[in-house]
Image: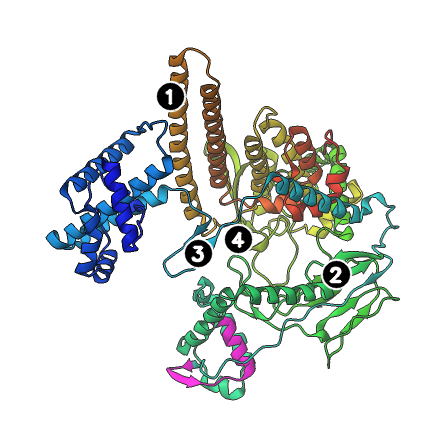
Amino acid sequence: MGRESDAKGDARLKQKGLKRKPPSDRENAGSGGDLTKKRSTKSKEKKNNDRSPEKVREILEPVSSSSDLVKLELQDDFTEKKKKKGLKRKRVKDEPTEEAAAAEAAAEAAAEAAAEAASVSERGIKSLSDEEASEEEAQKKESKKKPGKTVKKEEGEEPVTKKPKRSKEEIEEAKMLKMKKKEEEEQSRWRWWEEDRYEDGVKWKSLEHNGPYFPPEYQPLPDDVNFFYNGKKMKLSLAAEEVALFFAQMLDHEYTTKKVFRENFFRDWRKEMTRQERLVITDLEKCDFRELHAFHKDKVEARKALSKEEKQAQKDANQKIVDKYGYCLLDNHKERIGNFKLEPPGLFRGRGEHPKQGMLKKRILPEDIIINCSKEAKIPAPPAGHHWKEVRHDNTVTWLASWTENVQGSIKYIMLNANSKLKGEKDWEKYEVARKLKSCVDSIRDGYLRDLKSKQMVARQRAVALYFIDKLALRAGNEKEEGETADTVGCCSLRVEHITLHDELDGSECVVEFDFLGKDSIRYYNKVPVIKKVFKNIKLFMESKDPGDELFDRLNTTLLNKHLSSLMPGLTAKVFRTYNASITLQQQLQQLTNKSDNVAEKLLSYNRANRAVAILCNHQRAPPKTFEQSMANLHSKIVARKEQLALAKTELKLAKKEMKTKGSPDSKLQSMVDRKAAVVKRCEEQLLKMELQATDREENKQIALGTSKLNYLDPRISVAWCKNMDVPIEKIYNKTQREKFAWAIDMTAADFEF
C-alpha cells in the first residue's frame, strides 16, 4: 500500500514538473524516524525565501493525506532503526531493486518537504545553537567518509584534484625508468679510482673553467622606504644605504641585540658613510631601520607568493647560471664546481661569541681574485670594465680561484664539488694514512709514555700533548695573531686557565677538567681521569705560571707534527683524530649491532655508534628550534598508532573467535583472519619504527652526527657494515653523500676492516 502511494506521489510530482531530491548526509545523520531534521540557518533562510505559500502547497499535495504521511514516517523510522542495528531488510526475489529505490527516495523527499513545511508554519526557525550542533555532527560524519577525487580545501578556494592512482604497469614502468637512469649515471661516471695516479704533486694535466659568478649589484631602495635618525627622515648615500639594509634584514635575529655585534657593525658602517652622514649619525640607538626591515620582509613574502610559472622562470634562469659557471673540464672530464657563486656582501656572524661578529664583509671584486687554469685553456673573461688580480697555471693545487677576505684575512678558494676526482683522491689518501697508523700506533704510544719521564721538558710536554690528542681526540691547535680571530685554542695552545686539576672527583683519582673554546668557538668541557704520570707532569707545567700563560710553553703544532712525521711518513696530529674516530666507529658497530635485528633497530645502533664518535670529537650543536614541536608531533603519531594497534588486535581476536565458533573450515573467514593479522603486524612494525625514531632524535638533539660521518669516518667501514647487515646504503648516505663516496661504495667488499 505504501509503495502504491509513493508511486502515485512520484507521478504527481512529474506532472507538476518537479524532481525528487535524494536525502543528504546531514538528513541521515539524525535518529531514526525524526522528520524534522536540523538545518543550517543559511539553508533554511534560502529555502524559505525561495518558496512561496503556493509552492509549498504544490509540494504538499502528493502527501496531503494523513494516512500516507504516517506510513512514510513509519517506513523512515524502520529504515533508520535497521541502519542503526546494522541489519539488512530482506528483499523479495521478484522485487525490482531500482524501482524500489526510486520509490523510497520519492517517499523520503516528500516526507522531507512535508516536515519542512510543517516546521516553518508551526514552529518557525530553530535556534542558532541547535543549527551549529547539527552542522558539527554532520561534519564529523562527513570527515569519516573517504575523500573523493576532488577535495575542497576551504570555502572560496578552488577544489584540489587528487592525482589518480597509478596502475601496477605504470608503477613498474616508473621503476624501470629510474633503474635505467641510474645505470646511465653509473656508466657516465668517471671511475678515476681505477686509473693510474699522477706522480707526486701533480693534481691535473688540463683545467678549464669560466671563473666565478659574481652576485648582482645593489639596487637602491624605493622612494617610499625611508631610514630615520632621531625621528627624522634621512636619505642615505648608496654605500651607506646598502650596509644599513644588511642590519635591517637581521632585526629579527638575536645577533642585533648583542653588544659586540652592534659595536662592530656601527664602526664599519660609519666607514661607508659620507663625511656629512658621519657628522649626523653618531649613535646607533637613534637609528630607525623599521621601514627597511618591513621592505625586506615584503620582498621575502613576495618571493614565496610567486606563481608556478614565475618560480619556473626563476629556476630556468638559475639553471643557465649553473650550466655556464657550475662546471669545469678537468683532464677532459666534466666536473661539478662546488662553490662557484661568490658570497654577496653582508655582516659577519661567526660561530659562538666571535669577537668580529657584526663586521662588514665587503663585496668581492675581480681585482681581488687569482684565477688558476691550464696554460692551453681559454682564460675566463672578467666582468666588463674589470680585470683579474692574477692568472696562474699551477697544477699542484686543486683550487680554481682564490682571494683574501677582509674580516679575518683568511684565503678563500673556489674548489671542485665533493664528488669530484680531486676531492675523492684527497679523502682516499687521508683514510689510507689513518689505516697505516693502525700498524704502528702501539709503538708510538709506548714512545710517548716513556717520554713522560724524560729529563728534557720539551719531550715531556710533547708526550702529554700526544696523550691528550690520542685519548681525547683534541685538535692540535694553530698559532694565531693576537685579536685576529676568536679566542679559540687547541691542544698545543692551551693556557693554564683552561685546566683545573682534581686529586679526586666523583670517585675518580687524578681528574683533569678542561674548559675552553675550540674550533668555531664551540665550547669543550670535559672531566677526564688520567694516569698519574700525566697528572704529575701537568702539575709541573702549571707551577709558577699565571692563568694566561701557555701550558705547553716549549711546544707548538709545527714541532709536534715534525716529530710525528719522523715516526711515520705523512703522520700529523690530525691523522690521530681520523684514526680514533674510524676505529671507534668500527668497534662500536661490532658491539652494538645484531644481524637478527630489523633495519630500524640496526639504524639506531649505527647512529649510536656514530654518536660515540661525535662525542669523542666534540661535535656539538644547539637543539633545532623546531625540535620540541617535531617531537610532540611524533609522540602524538605514536599515541594514534597505539590506538590503531589496539583496535586491530581486537578485530583480529573477534575474527579468530568467529572462526572458532563456526567450527568447520571457512576460506572467507580464514582470509579475513589473515588480513587482520597482517594489519596487526604492519601496525606493530610502524609503531616500533616510530618509537626508535623518537629515541634516536632525543639522543641526538645536541650532537652533530654529520660532521664525523663526512669528514672523519672512513666510508668503507659503513659500506662493509651495510653489506654484512643487509642494510641498504641509501639508509646511511643520501644521494649527495653516495656521489661523494662513490669510490668507497664501488671498491669495498663485505670483509673490509679499517
Above or below 73: residue 53:
below
* Residue at the disc numbered 1: 654
Above or below 442: residue 616:
below
Residue at mark 3 to residue at mark 1: CA–CA distance: 40 Å
Instruction: Tell me the amino acid under the disc marked 4.
Output: Pro
Is tag 3's residue or tag 1's residue first in the polypeptide sequence? 3
Which numbered tag is attached to residue 331? Answer: none
* Residue at the disc numbered 2: 327
* Residue at the disc numbered 3: 159
Indicate the position of residue 18 as horizontal and vertical percent values. Answer: 29, 54
Instruction: Tell me the amino acid under the disc marked 3.
Output: Pro
Instruction: Tell me the amino acid under the disc marked 1.
Output: Leu
Q: Is disc 4 in contact with disc 2, using a CB cutoff of under 8 Å? A: no
| Residue 101 included in the magenta stretch of the image | no
Q: Looking at the rendering, which quadrant does residue 570 occupy? A: top right
Above or below 556: residue 261:
below
Name the residue nearer the viewer: 490 or 231: 231
Residues drawn in magenta: 228-248
Q: Looking at the rendering, which quadrant does residue 372 occupy? A: bottom right
- Of helix, strand and loop, which one carries label 3? loop
Please name which of the two marks, 3 or 1, marks the residue nearer to the observer.
3
Please name which of the two marks, 2 or 3, marks the residue nearer to the observer.
3
Which numbered tag is attached to residue 547? Answer: 4
Is tag 2's residue or tag 3's residue first in the polypeptide sequence? 3
Residue at mark 4 to residue at mark 2: CA–CA distance: 52 Å
Please name which of the two marks, 1 or 4, marks the residue nearer to the observer.
1
Please name which of the two marks, 4 or 3, marks the residue nearer to the observer.
3
Indicate the position of residue 454 as horizontal and vertical percent values. Answer: 70, 38
Residue at 46% in and 74% down: 295
| Residue 243 included in the magenta stretch of the image | yes
Indicate the quadrant containing the N terminus: top left, top right, bottom left or bottom right: top left
Residue at 17% in and 59% down: 53
